[in-house]
Every structure is written in structure tokens, then in C-alpha cells.
């Protein structure tokens, strides 16, 4: 595969992305690619679905390379995330040069706390540095995910590639879910776990809404993610709400764990979405990314979307990618994957967040 | 790009879509149900709190209104506002906040601005204007509310008229009650409206009694005419001051000085009066004058000493001369010398008594009316004040010219006039701190005696000339009591005279005392009657007890040739012994002796006579001290008379004659 890439580029790439399914043969795949491309700047992870010029695919591998003299790329790696996510984030950021203007981050989707890693990174590189990317997946099995940096195959790690140089960036995010019903307060929460809503155990509240479908948790929580609607989530009042997808429930203490942090005291609301709104969101995200880019010409598209959208869209998932490509440029190169959580700023020059159930589009242009 | 899917796949897809849709509608329904319930609850709560809020506003005993924060247009108000201000709701809604306030109210915009910034306004006092035009005082507080997107000011207004009145009254009351003088608030017609406790105490009436009286009924009828002009003056806004005698309950007339002025009492004109008890002040004045006199005497001690030195010189010299002339047998010259000694002693006695008079308070003790020579008095005053103007180091500093004019006789109390003279000389010297000349002269014109004191001192300013005779007025600073000239004025007036003053600033001042000439030119001559003139047939037995042997010796010498047989005792004990053994016609005992004082001797003598059943012999006490003994004490000690040292022998002789009742028992 590596050779194929070099063939397309007509030269050795300066940086490569490798996204692949976590099924068998990852190790050898990695080795093979490395041998072929012969660059240290190889970055990537396992996923829950891949995005390429072919569109959406699953149980596949995608290799992307860029050769350019206008951008410099640097890699940074940090392991043992689960010991201290925030410190890891700081360490990761310290591994990148100060000239970094933009970075893409891939962290372990099962063991990492994306919000904490981001906090660490932002504390070193500044609040305004745009971070795109996603958390590594494993085809929805939630067993183990892998991250790639050069020849290394890591787990419980975070890898980042920093872009510095002369380029333009545009980002857009949209989810398609809208808050429904009255807001409640997360009266007791810690990290990714929500214990109580308005003084009641979170699980009890959810069961009231879900009724007979309550036993389908946590997976049904993916269709109806929790939206942070108060100031904690209402980012710059642009009608965008940070979503949180349910990951697991604890029937003993009535708590629910999500794929992102729930700040205690935050105002939350159940959200609802359907295929139409989700797809519309994808299109909207793409449109936002282009308008964010401004006058520059798009050279490359990165799309990091959420596996939750895959569940909702079902067989129409590839329509999402198609819509995005159509919006931006059908013949432009695109790469990305379906993750367990997405990193993206709301827009350029805004703070980056960890999103759930969201499609993020980043475009690089000159 | 639509791919062709197998029908099975499609059906599966459709089924899952259907299930999804079903789920969604179910969950959404649940959400909606919950939302509706919560909404209903919230609505209920809002409605209830709305109703409560409305109730408060509608029924509040305060004016509540809402005005637009920018335009200050009144948007809404509660019923109390309409009642309180007298406008209808419609009228109020067409007005702005400033229309409600007293014209000229400041800070309105700023307050609202501040409220917008901080969210509330501190309590402010404002005057509101009712529809009737009447003004009311009120406290305003407010907060900012947002109504339909507009920033508005919600104001709560409390009428504080009553509170202010109470506050004012309580302020008044405190002052009123705590002042140490009687204080009265009266109607402008005079009846008392309020009196403080001190007034009740001092005047001796209870509060209900006083409140039924007026100043007319309180003061002595003698002073009624003083009140006539006062009322008008007060009503014209002037502050008046007048002295009247107040008739207290007990009937005593106590002089009070009233200070009165117009005030507003319970919003109506009234008169506020403060009464100062003058009896106290007069007492104080007396004490002050006394202490001034004492200090003046202290100042002049050296002058006194000088005077005495002169006299002693005369006595010594004359005594020595007498001895000499005795030896040479020139009896005439010896007699002359002795006369001059007696003269000098008299003079000395006079000086002593004058100085004593100068420091005594009781007029009773100094009521001696004499005909005396102003000239002699002036000379003495000049001598007394010598230290003031004769500084041995600066002999040329002051000059005192005294132009003698013989035959200037005045009838009156020489000690009092003496005081006036001393005072004027003192003032003249004080007016010439850098030196100058004081000229004193006397002259007679139209039966009146004019004595002038002319100094070359700093002079008196025109605005002060009117005031120099006022009590306590002084330009000499705090060490001067300001009583010198005022008391001098009083004394001169008492003698039927007057004091005139003329002055030029920087040049000097002229004081002129005018006194009526004595009606008779007869001089009160000391009757130096020789013992021969008084020889009578009856021999008097006279006992003298004194521990000063020289005095006894002199007495013996004198009485040798008279009809008085003198017995002497040199101690009280010896005296009492003699008293018990012999009978006498009159006894004179020295007051201050070592073993017993005169009073004790008198008492012992009285007891002895009582026990023995014999009538008490007249008993006199001789003393050089200024003891003031009341009649009861004297009577209790059996003392019939006090004789003051030094006493000329012939005077003593006469006294003895007076004391002995006729007929005389001779033993």
C-alpha cells in the first residue's frame, strides 16, 4: 500500500496518515507501510470506519500522504494516558515546536479522557491553537484500540502531528441533534460520569424518558445523546451544543458514564435527531469549513466523524461523506475516520473541544 | 449515487428505520409529557407568585411606581401612589418622575444611572409634590427591572413626614431637657407651650402649673413694662435679651436674664427663651472682684511695705527725737515729736484698715461714711501703686504728676473711692507699657469735684469706648476680669457722682471722676482728748488680759492719770483666777493667747458668774485679726463687744465708759 502511495505522489511523502480497522494484521500492516514510505512522520490509529477518496469504508485501511515544502510536520507521542491524561496532554504539547499552528490528535478511544488531554495541550500551546482529530476506535467492540507513531504501535497513548508553516485552515462542526424538553441540572457529576440530574439519579431520569426502551442503554443513548445547553456547552451562542454520548450505565448507583466530561452544575437536555437532520448537519459542517477557510484554495480535506452517526445513518452513512465532498470539491483528496470522540475547534481561532456524535471537517488550503 | 440493493437488505433497512421512528415518537412523547407537567407546575408557580406580587403592590402602604429608566416616564403605579399624591392613575401615567418631585430636585438622572449600574439605589430623601401643591418628605429606594426588553426603574416611596416630625422633636427634646438653664417655649402671645425640668425646679412650679402660665404671670409686676417692647422685637425676628425678677413659688424674687428668639415649633411660630440665673452670676462677680482685689493687693504688697517703712521711719525718728528732747528738757519739742508718732500710727492704722476694706466683700463692714480729703486719698493711692510706675531700674520710664488742690472734701466711703483711684491709676499704667506720663489733678466747679487722670497711653478705640464700663468687657486678654471699670463706675455712681472718659487712639486717655462736694467742711477730727477731760468721780475697775507685756505696760501708763483702775493679767489662767477673786466693771481680754483664746475665757467667765449667781461683768475681746463672729457665738461666749487692734487709748477709754452700766458698783 505504501508503494501505491509513493507512486501517486511521485515522491516520498513528508507525512503520512494511516487509519485502519483493528482487525487482524495491524502489526504487519504498519511494518509494511513504514518500510515502504520510509518517513518518520507516520501517524494514525485504529478506527470504527474509514474515510478516503473512495468514500466511506469499513474494515479497511487508508493511507494518506502529503508532500509539500510549505508546511513542516512534527510528531509527538505520549503514553500511559490513563495515569494522568492532563499531564500527558502537556507532555505531548511540549514535544511539539513553538511554531506549531495547528495539530491533529489521535488518542486511545477507550482509556483516554479527551477533555483532559486537550486541557493539557492548550495549557502549553495556548487556548487558541486549533486541534483536529479523533479518538481511536475498534469497530465498536470497545476492547482495545491502537495508535501509530512511526514504527511504533501503541495503546493507551496519544499521538499528535503538528503543522507549522505557511497555510490556511478552515474548520466546521455540526451534529444535527437538537435539545428537546426542559433543561435539567447535572447536580452531581465527576469526570465523564453523571450521577444525578436535578437531585435524581441520572439513570432514573433516563428510564423515565426511555420507558420500555430503557434496557437498551447504553446503546440507545447514542441516538439520544445528552446536550450541554447551558453556558458550559453553549459555545459562543452559535446554536451549537456540545453532545455527550452514553458509554455505559451503572445500575447500582444509577450513574451513567459518557464519552466526554460532564461538568457538575452544567445545564443539560436530552437531544433528538433523525437521519435528515444528521445529514443536513454534515453538509452544514462542510459549508462552515469552507467559509472558515476564506479565500484560500482547498488542498486537502480531513473528516473526523462519530461512530454514533454511523449507527443512526445506517447504510446511508456514506451519504455523509458524499455530501461533504460535493460541498467542498468532489475531486479533492479527503481522509479521516469514524471515531469514539472528535477533536475540533468551533471555528478557526476558537478553542478546541472534544465532541461526541459530531462531524468535524477540517480543510487545509493555500 | 444510489446503489441497487437487494430487496432483503432494503426490507431490513426499512424495518430498522421504522423501529427507529417508533422509538423516537415514543421517547419524544415521554419528553413532551414531562415537559408539559413541568411547564404546568412552573406556570402555577408563576401565577401564584404573580398574584402574591400583585397583592403586595396593590395593598402596599407605600407608593410603588415603575418608570422607564431612560425617559423617566411613569409606566405603572399602585393605588397608594394615587391616594398619596392625589392624582388619578391616568394622570400619573402621563407624567414623568420629575413632575412628582419638588422642583429643583437634583441627582435624578444620576441616581437612575447608578441604579442601572449597581442594580439598586441607596435610600434617598426627596420631597414630593402632591396635586394640591403641598410638599411631603419621603424616602425613596429602588431597583432596576426589565420589562419587555426595556430597562425600568422600580421605586418604593415611603412618606416620612411623621418620622421627621418625631425626629425633630426628639432632637429638640434632648437639647431642651439637658440644658442647665431653664428653657421655655412659648406661644407668640406669651403662654407657655413647653418647659424643661430645670425651669420647673428653678421656678418652683410643677410642669402643669407652669404650662398654664405665661411670662407676664411669672415675673415680678415691677418689671412688667420691660415686656412691652420685647414682644414686638421678638416677632420682628430680633434676638432679645432682658433682665427681670422672677417670682418663684416661694415668693422669692430672683433676678434672671432672659434670651429670647423666634423659632418654628411644630411648624408654627413660637418663642424660645433661655433664662440665666443672675444671682449666681452676681455671686460670681463678687468672688471675682474679691480675688482680683487680693491679687491686686499682692501686687502692691511692696507699695504697702514702702508706705509702712515711711511711717516707721517717722515713728522711729520721732521717738528718738522725743527721748533726746526729754533729756534736754525741751518738753514742747518732745510733745511735738510724740504727737507726730501718734499721727503716724493713726495713718498706719488707716492704711491697714483701707487695705482690709479693699479685700472685704461685705459692704456691711465698710459702711463707714466719712468726710474725707480726696487729696490725701489720692496721695495714698499713688503711694500704694508706686511699684507699678517706679521701677528702680528704669526710673525715667514713668512720670506721675500729682497736682495737689487742698480743700477738696468729699462725703462718702473713703475705702470705696480709694479703690476707684487705685483702679484708674492701674489702668493708666497698663495702657502705657512702654512708658509715659500720668497726670492727676483735682478741681472744683459748680459745687462738684472733678478729678482727672490723664495718661499718654495707647488710647481706646471708638467702638470700645461705649463698652468699657460693661462688666466683663476687657481688651486685656484672659487674665483681666474686665470688672475694674464697671465696679468703679458703680462705686462712683453710689456716691452720687459720675465717670467720664475721652480718648484718642495712640495719643492717650482722660478719665474724669465727678463727685459732689461734701456739704459740710467740718472735718471728722480724731478727738485726741486728754485723759483730764474725762475725769469723773467714779472710779472704774478695768481688767485687761493680754499676753503681750508691752501692750499692758502702755495701757498702765496711760490709764495712770485717769479714773480707771487698771488691773492686768498676762495669761488667760491668771486672768480667770483674778476674775474669780475680784469684781470688775469691765473686762478686756486679748483674743489670741497661748493658753486659751478670748472666747474661751469669756465662756469661763460667763459660767463662773452664772454658777456664782452674780451678774455678768461686761466682757470685751481685743483682737488684731479679722475674725467675723456671729452674734450667737459671741453671746454663747459671754462676749459683749469686739474691739479691734490697734485701738487708740482714748477710744478705748470711751468704750469702757460706754460699756459700764450706771450705777457702778465699786468694791
Image (cartoon, rainbow, N blue to C red):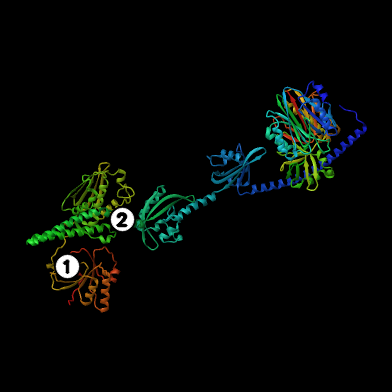
Q: Residue furthest top?
A: A10
Q: Is residue B161 above or below residue A281?
A: below
Q: Quadrant of residue B192?
A: bottom left
* Secondary structure at numbered mark 1: helix
Residue position for label 1: B553
Q: Quadrant of the C terminus of chain B?
A: bottom left
**Tag 1: Cα neighbours inside 10 Å, few (<14), some, or many (≥20)?**
few
Q: Is residue B120 above or below residue B554?
A: above
Percent across and percent down for residue B128 are: 55, 44
Q: Nearer the viewer, mark 1 or mark 2?
A: 1
- Labels in figure, total: 2
The alpha-carbon separation of the residues under discs 1 and 2 comes to 40 Å
Q: Which numbered marker is on residue B618?
A: none
Residue position for label 2: B291
Q: Nearer the N terminus, badge 1 or badge 2?
A: 2
Pick whichever, A156 or B138, lies toward us: A156
Percent across and percent down for residue A101 are: 70, 28
* Secondary structure at numbered mark 2: helix
Percent across and percent down for residue A140 are: 83, 37
Q: Is residue B78 visible?
A: yes
Q: Residue furthest right?
A: B7
Same-chain check, marks 1 and 2: yes
User: Which chain's residue wears label 1?
Assistant: B
Q: Is residue A84 above or below residue B381?
A: above
Q: Is residue B466 above or below residue A283?
A: below
Amino acid at each position: 500500500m505504501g508503494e501505491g502511495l509513493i507512486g501517486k505522489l511521485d515522491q516520498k511523502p513528508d507525512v503520512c496518515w494511516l487509519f485502519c480497522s483493528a482487525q487482524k494484521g495491524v502489526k504487519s500492516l504498519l511494518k509494511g507501510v513504514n518500510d515502504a514510505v520510509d518517513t518518520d512522520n507516520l501517524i494514525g490509529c485504529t478506527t470504527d470506519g474509514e474515510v478516503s477518496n473512495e468514500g466511506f469504508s469499513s474494515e479497511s485501511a487508508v493511507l494518506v500522504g502529503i508532500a509539500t515544502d510549505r508546511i513542516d510536520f512534527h510528531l509527538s507521542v505520549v503514553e500511559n494516558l490513563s495515569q494522568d491524561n492532563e499531564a500527558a496532554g502537556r507532555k505531548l504539547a511540549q514535544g511539539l515546536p513553538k511554531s506549531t499552528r495547528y495539530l491533529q490528535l489521535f488518542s486511545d478511544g477507550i482509556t483516554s479522557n479527551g477533555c483532559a488531554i486537550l486541557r493539557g495541550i492548550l495549557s502549553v500551546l495556548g487556548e487558541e491553537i486549533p486541534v483536529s482529530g479523533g479518538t481511536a476506535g475498534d469497530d465498536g467492540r470497545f476492547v482495545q484500540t491502537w495508535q501509530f507513531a512511526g514504527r511504533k504501535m501503541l495503546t493507551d497513548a496519544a499521538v499528535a502531528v503538528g503543522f507549522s508553516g505557511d497555510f490556511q485552515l478552515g474548520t466546521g462542526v455540526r451534529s444535527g441533534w437538537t435539545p428537546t424538553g426542559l433543561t435539567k441540572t447535572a447536580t452531581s457529576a465527576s469526570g465523564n460520569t453523571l450521577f444525578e440530574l436535578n437531585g435524581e439519579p441520572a439513570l432514573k431520569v433516563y428510564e423515565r424518558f426511555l420507558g420500555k426502551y430503557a434496557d437498551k442503554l447504553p446503546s440507545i443513548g447514542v441516538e439520544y445523546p445528552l446536550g450541554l445547553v447551558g453556558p458550559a456547552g453553549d459555545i459562543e451562542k452559535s446554536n451549537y451544543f456540545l453532545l455527550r454520548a452514553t458509554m455505559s450505565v451503572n445500575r447500582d448507583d444509577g450513574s451513567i458514564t459518557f464519552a466526554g466530561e460532564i461538568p457538575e452544575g452544567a445545564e443539560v437536555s436530552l437531544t433528538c435527531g433523525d437521519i435528515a437532520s444528521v445529514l443536513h448537519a454534515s453538509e452544514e459542517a462542510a459549508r462552515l469549513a469552507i467559509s472558515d477557510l476564506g479565500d484560500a484554495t482547498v488542498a486537502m480535506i480531513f473528516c473526523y466523524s462519530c461512530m454514533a452517526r454511523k449507527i443512526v445513518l445506517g447504510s446511508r452513512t456514506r451519504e455523509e461523506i458524499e455530501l461533504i465532498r460535493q460541498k467542498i470539491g468532489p475531486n479533492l483528496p479527503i481522509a479521516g475516520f469514524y471515531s469514539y470522540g472528535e477533536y475540533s475547534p468551533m471555528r478557526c481561532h476558537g478553542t478546541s473541544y472534544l465532541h461526541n456524535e459530531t462531524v468535524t471537517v477540517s480543510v487545509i488550503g493555500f | 449515487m444510489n446503489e441497487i440493493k437487494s430487496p432483503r437488505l432494503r426490507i431490513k433497512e426499512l424495518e430498522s428505520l421504522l423501529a427507529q421512528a417508533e422509538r423516537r415518537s415514543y421517547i419524544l412523547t415521554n419528553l413532551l409529557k414531562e415537559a408539559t407537567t413541568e411547564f404546568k407546575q412552573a406556570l402555577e408557580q408563576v401565577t401564584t407568585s404573580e398574584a402574591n406580587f400583585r397583592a403586595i403592590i396593590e395593598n402596599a402602604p407605600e407608593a410603588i411606581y415603575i418608570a422607564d429608566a431612560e425617559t423617566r416616564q411613569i409606566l405603572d403605579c399602585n393605588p397608594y401612589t394615587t391616594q398619596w399624591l392625589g392624582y388619578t392613575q391616568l394622570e400619573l401615567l402621563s407624567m414623568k418622575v420629575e413632575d412628582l418631585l419638588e422642583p429643583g430636585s437634583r441627582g435624578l438622572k444620576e441616581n437612575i444611572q447608578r441604579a442601572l449600574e449597581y442594580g439598586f439605589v441607596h435610600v434617598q430623601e426627596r420631597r414630593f409634590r402632591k396635586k394640591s401643591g403641598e410638599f411631603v418628605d419621603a424616602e425613596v429606594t429602588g431597583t432596576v427591572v426589565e420589562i419587555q426588553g426595556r430597562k425600568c426603574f422600580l421605586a418604593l416611596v415611603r412618606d416620612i413626614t411623621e418620622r421627621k416630625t418625631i425626629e425633630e422633636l426628639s432632637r429638640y427634646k434632648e437639647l431642651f431637657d439637658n440644658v442647665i438653664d431653664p428653657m421655655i417655649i412659648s406661644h407668640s402671645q406669651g403662654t407657655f407651650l413647653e418647659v424643661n425640668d430645670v425651669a420647673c425646679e428653678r421656678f418652683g412650679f410643677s410642669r402643669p402649673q407652669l404650662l398654664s402660665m405665661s411670662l407676664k404671670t411669672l415675673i415680678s409686676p415691677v418689671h412688667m413694662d420691660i415686656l412691652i417692647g420685647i414682644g414686638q422685637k421678638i416677632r420682628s425676628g430680633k434676638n432679645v435679651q432682658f433682665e427681670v425678677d422672677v417670682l418663684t413659688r416661694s415668693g422669692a424674687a430672683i433676678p434672671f436674664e432672659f434670651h429670647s428668639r423666634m423659632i418654628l415649633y411644630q411648624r408654627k411660630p413660637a418663642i424660645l427663651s433661655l433664662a440665666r440665673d443672675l444671682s449666681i452670676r452676681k455671686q460670681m462677680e463678687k468672688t471675682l472682684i474679691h480675688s482680683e482685689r487680693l491679687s491686686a493687693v499682692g501686687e502692691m504688697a511692696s507699695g504697702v511695705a514702702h508706705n509702712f517703712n515711711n511711717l516707721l521711719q517717722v515713728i522711729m525718728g520721732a521717738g528718738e527725737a522725743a527721748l533726746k528732747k526729754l533729756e534736754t528738757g525741751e518738753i514742747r519739742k518732745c510733745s511735738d515729736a510724740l504727737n507726730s508718732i501718734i499721727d503716724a500710727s493713726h495713718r498706719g492704722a488707716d492704711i491697714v484698715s483701707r487695705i482690709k476694706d479693699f479685700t472685704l466683700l461685705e459692704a456691711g463692714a465698710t459702711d463707714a461714711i466719712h468726710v474725707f480729703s480726696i487729696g490725701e486719698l489720692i496721695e495714698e493711692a499713688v503711694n500704694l501703686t508706686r511699684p507699678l510706675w517706679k521701677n528702680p531700674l528704669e526710673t525715667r520710664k514713668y512720670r506721675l504728676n500729682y497736682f495737689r488742690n487742698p480743700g477738696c472734701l468729699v462725703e462718702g466711703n473713703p475705702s470705696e473711692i480709694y479703690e476707684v483711684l487705685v483702679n484708674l491709676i492701674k489702668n493708666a499704667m497698663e495702657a502705657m507699657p512702654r512708658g509715659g506720663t500720668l497726670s492727676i489733678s483735682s478741681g472744683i466747679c459748680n459745687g462738684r469735684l472733678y478729678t482727672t487722670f490723664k495718661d499718654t497711653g495707647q488710647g481706646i478705640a471708638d467702638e470700645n469706648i461705649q463698652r468699657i464700663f460693661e462688666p466683663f468687657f476687657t481688651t486685656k486678654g484672659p487674665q483681666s476680669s474686665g470688672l475694674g471699670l464697671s465696679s468703679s463706675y458703680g462705686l462712683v455712681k453710689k456716691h452720687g457722682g459720675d465717670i467720664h472718659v475721652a480718648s484718642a487712639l495712640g495719643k492717650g486717655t482722660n478719665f474724669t471722676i465727678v463727685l459732689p462736694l461734701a456739704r459740710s467742711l467740718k472735718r471728722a477730727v480724731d478727738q485726741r482728748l486728754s485723759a483730764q477731760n474725762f475725769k469723773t468721780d467714779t472710779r472704774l475697775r478695768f481688767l485687761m488680759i493680754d499676753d503681750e507685756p508691752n501692750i499692758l505696760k502702755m495701757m498702765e501708763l496711760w490709764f495712770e492719770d485717769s479714773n480707771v483702775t487698771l488691773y492686768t493679767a498676762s495669761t488667760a489662767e491668771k486672768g480667770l483666777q483674778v476674775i474669780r477673786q475680784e469684781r470688775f466693771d469691765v473686762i478686756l481680754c486679748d483674743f489670741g493667747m497661748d493658753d486659751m483664746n478670748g472666747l474661751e475665757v469669756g465662756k469661763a467667765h460667763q459660767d463662773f458668774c452664772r454658777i456664782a449667781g452674780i451678774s455678768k461683768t461686761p466682757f470685751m475681746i481685743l483682737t488684731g485679726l479679722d475674725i467675723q463672729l456671729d452674734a450667737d457665738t459671741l453671746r454663747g461666749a459671754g462676749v459683749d463687744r469686739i474691739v479691734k487692734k490697734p485701738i487708740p487709748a482714748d477710744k478705748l477709754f470711751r468704750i469702757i465708759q460706754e460699756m459700764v452700766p450706771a450705777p457702778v458698783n465699786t468694791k
